[in-house]
Image (cartoon, rainbow, N blue to C red):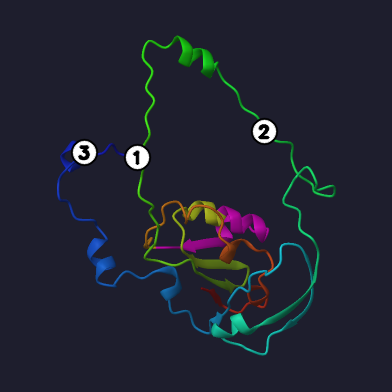
Amino acid sequence: MSPQPQAAVGAPLSRVDGRLKVTGEAQYAAEFDVDGVLHAVIVDASIGRGRITGVDTREAAQHGVSLVEVRHDAQQPSTDLADAKDAKADEPTTCARGDAEAGLRDSAVRMDLTYRMARNHHNPMETHATIARWDGDKLTVWDKTQWVVGTQTELSTVFDLPMESVRVINPFVGAVSAAGCAAGRTRSSPRWPPVRRNVPSRWP
């Protein structure tokens, strides 16, 4: 990575993609026109633990997701690792370095300060979305991601494909603050039924 030029600090420089974003001309992942795309919406779980016993999908629209009736065999979830007898959890990790108490006690200068910050809420310009299309054994994905190679690697692993068979497209990133770095639910699941049927699919 090239070092930041000192002339940029404090200077009113324009972003390369700034005008495109503020005028609505920047094309984000969900806005690509893919022929024959099937629109899919994720129905989130409404219970903490259990098994699905039935699904009513007669409402086939994005608003209909809130009307989809999912029947569950609900079980009591466990939120305490000590009580989760059947949970397969790793042992807690501990990390220690130095002696903080001795360091504070022997310091020549000690400061006890309180800082308060106003609450901030991150609202990205681009919502999370993914479009996936199969062309034979090649997978093309338009995705809101700030880490194209990471998404390519993830999909290559999930679908057991060579890296060169996975193409990830994202010409613009509509603000992420690391939200576009980790695997998103719209692209990480190996159970993509529309993708398995070779139908182009979009997840909002």
The residue identified by callout 2 is 93
Q: Residue 106 or 197: which is nearer the viewer?
A: 106
The residue identified by callout 1 is 1
Circle 3 crowding by C-alpha within 10 Å: few under 14, some 14–19, many from 20: few
Is label 2 in a helix, a strand or a loop?
loop
Please name the residue shown 70% across and 35% down the image: 92
Circle 1 crowding by C-alpha within 10 Å: few under 14, some 14–19, many from 20: few
In the image, is residue 169 part of the stretch drawn in magenta?
yes
**Amino acid under label 1?**
Met
Compared with 142, 41 (above or below) is below
Circle on res. 5: 3
Q: In this view, does 19 lie to the left or right of 173?
A: left
Residue farthest bottom in this picture: 58
Compared with 66, 97 (above or below) is above
**Amino acid under label 2?**
Thr
Q: Residue 110 or 148: which is nearer the viewer?
A: 110
**Amino acid under label 3?**
Pro
Q: Residue 57: x, y in percent? A: 68, 85
Q: Give the Cα separation between the discs numbered 3 and 1.
A: 12 Å
Q: Give the Cα separation between the discs numbered 2 and 3.
A: 41 Å
Q: In which quarter of the image is residue 201?
A: bottom right
Give the quadrant of the N terminus.
top left
First in residue order: circle 2 vs circle 1: 1
Q: Residue 100: x, y in percent? A: 52, 19
Q: Are marks 2 and 1 in contact (CB under 8 Å)?
A: no
Q: Give the Cα separation between the discs numbered 2 and 1.
A: 34 Å
In the image, is residue 135 part of the stretch drawn in magenta?
no
What span is colored magenta in the figure? 153-170
